[in-house]
């Protein structure tokens, strides 16, 4: 006689409707980093945001987003709209399977880059929906290790910022409770970089966490020279000292210098990250969930990196990454950028150098009314319940 209880599953909900928006989010001031000063890019004046809203037959909702800087926003929207019908009628719980389905629907244009960044907005929305339906924050759904994460500010340290204003920005960040400061470096005149870093280190004191970011603008000899000169400042890390695909060069720097090396934000797939993990080419790996195609591929990268003993410091999009960082085994850093704040009604809390993980269901985000005014194009697929 079998006394085991019969287990039934009532999870037969289906995706009924979705809406896509392409949003041009303006920045308060044009932004310049080393890529601008070397003539490779123009100052950034806006960010292209791809927003996905998903609703199921039973009325459950999810909100997700991806983004692109300087170019690619229209392409992301077009690709997302083209593959979106593949979601209608699907069970929203099957997130990994749906990621694969969307990826293969557009596989002829690649399984990384713009193609997967477009479906990343859907992936984030599906995870948000799943957590909301469970009544849990995304961090709790994933399995949180902590209720807050270390955070550092980048937006106040760009190269277009005069030194006196840069010092004021560091004071402002510290007053807000932010726990670290990152400066952009990589100018054609390396002496200017060293002067700015030296001035900020003196201003902050010897022990306050300080990072620098060269945005891929050094070749190997220049990187070795600058890493050697920067050793004296006791930095948390030196970020992107080389081209983002130069795993071998980054690995050499990791082995040669005491100051940790960080990279990974420009990589757009687990496969690209695996090459850096395999070669031990970073002390801090910096995946960006929207850039790699959403939360599903991000979690694959996280597992590989943690198995290899690497610490993660996810790039940008703090509203999303604060949840993912809470699930890391090793204590992470999250990047504080206020640029996306106008998109949402909610704000993240920061105390004593740490960013608090929201406890609202899902991502804990709702769209601001201002999004409508920044919307460049939008489309709906399916029928609302």
Image (tube, rainbow, N blue to C red):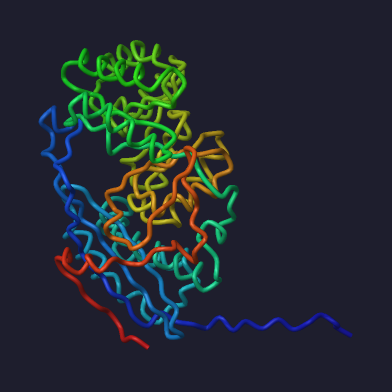
Residue 312 seen in render: no
Total numbered badges shown on the rendered structure:
0
**Residue extending furthest toward the right:** 1
Left or right position of 228 against 142: left
The quarter of the rendered structure image containing the N terminus is: bottom right
Residue 18 seen in render: yes
Residue 336, picture quadrant = top left
Up-down relation of residue 120 to residue 273 (above or below): below
Residue 260, picture quadrant = top left
Point out residue 294 in the picture as x, y percentages from the top left corner: 39, 56
Taking the spot 86% from the left edge, 82% from the top edge, the residue there is: 3
Point out residue 307 in the picture as x, y percentages from the top left corner: 57, 39
Up-down relation of residue 30 to residue 238 (above or below): below
Up-down relation of residue 108 to residue 327 (above or below): below
Taking the spot 36% from the left edge, 11% from the top edge, the residue there is: 228
The one of 163 and 63 positioned closer to us in this rendering: 163
Point out residue 69 in the picture as x, y percentages from the top left corner: 21, 48
Left or right position of 249 against 373: right
Residue 335, picture quadrant = top left
**Residue extending furthest toward the front:** 175
Left or right position of 362 against 337: right
Taking the spot 37% from the left edge, 46% from the top edge, the residue there is: 288
Point out residue 369 in the picture as x, y percentages from the top left corner: 25, 69
The quarter of the rendered structure image containing the C terminus is: bottom left
Up-down relation of residue 12 to residue 355 (above or below): below
The one of 85 and 50 positioned closer to us in this rendering: 50
The one of 202 and 110 positioned closer to us in this rendering: 202
């Amino acid at each position: 006689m079998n006394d085991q209880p019969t287990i039934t599953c009532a999870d037969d909900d289906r995706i009924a409707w979705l809406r896509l928006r392409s949003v041009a989010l303006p920045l308060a001031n044009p932004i310049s980093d080393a890529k601008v000063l070397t003539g490779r890019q123009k100052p950034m004046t806006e960010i292209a945001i791809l927003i996905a809203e998903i609703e199921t037959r039973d009325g459950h909702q999810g909100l997700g987003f991806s983004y692109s800087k300087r170019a690619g926003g229209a392409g992301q929207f077009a690709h997302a709209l083209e593959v979106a019908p593949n979601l209608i009628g699907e069970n929203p719980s099957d997130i990994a399977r749906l990621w694969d389905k969307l990826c293969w629907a557009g596989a002829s244009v690649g399984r990384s880059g713009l193609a997967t960044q477009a479906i990343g907005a859907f992936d984030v929305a599906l995870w948000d929906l799943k957590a909301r339906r469970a009544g849990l924050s995304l961090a709790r759904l994933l399995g949180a290790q902590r209720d807050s994460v270390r955070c550092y500010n980048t937006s106040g340290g760009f190269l277009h910022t005069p030194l006196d204003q840069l010092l004021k920005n560091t004071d402002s960040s510290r007053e807000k409770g932010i726990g670290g400061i990152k400066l952009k470096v990589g100018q054609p005149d390396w002496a200017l970089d060293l002067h700015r870093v030296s001035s900020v280190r003196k201003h902050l004191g010897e022990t306050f966490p300080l990072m620098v970011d060269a945005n891929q603008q050094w070749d190997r000899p220049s990187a070795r020279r600058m890493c050697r000169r920067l050793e004296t400042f006791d930095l948390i890390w030196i970020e992107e000292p080389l081209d983002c695909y130069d795993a071998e060069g980054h690995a050499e720097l990791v082995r040669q210098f005491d100051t940790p090396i960080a990279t990974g934000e420009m990589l757009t797939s687990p496969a690209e990250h695996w090459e850096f993990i395999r070669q031990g080419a970073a002390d801090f790996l910096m995946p960006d969930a929207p850039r790699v195609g959403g939360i599903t591929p991000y979690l694959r990268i996280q597992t590989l990196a943690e198995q290899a003993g690497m610490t993660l410091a996810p790039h940008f999009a703090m509203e999303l990454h604060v949840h993912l960082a809470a699930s890391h085994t090793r204590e992470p850093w999250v990047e504080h950028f206020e640029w996306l704040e106008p998109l949402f009604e909610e704000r993240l809390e920061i105390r004593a150098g740490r960013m608090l993980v929201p406890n609202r269901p899902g991502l804990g985000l709702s769209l601001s009314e201002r999004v409508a005014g920044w919307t460049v194009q939008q489309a709906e697929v399916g029928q609302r319940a």
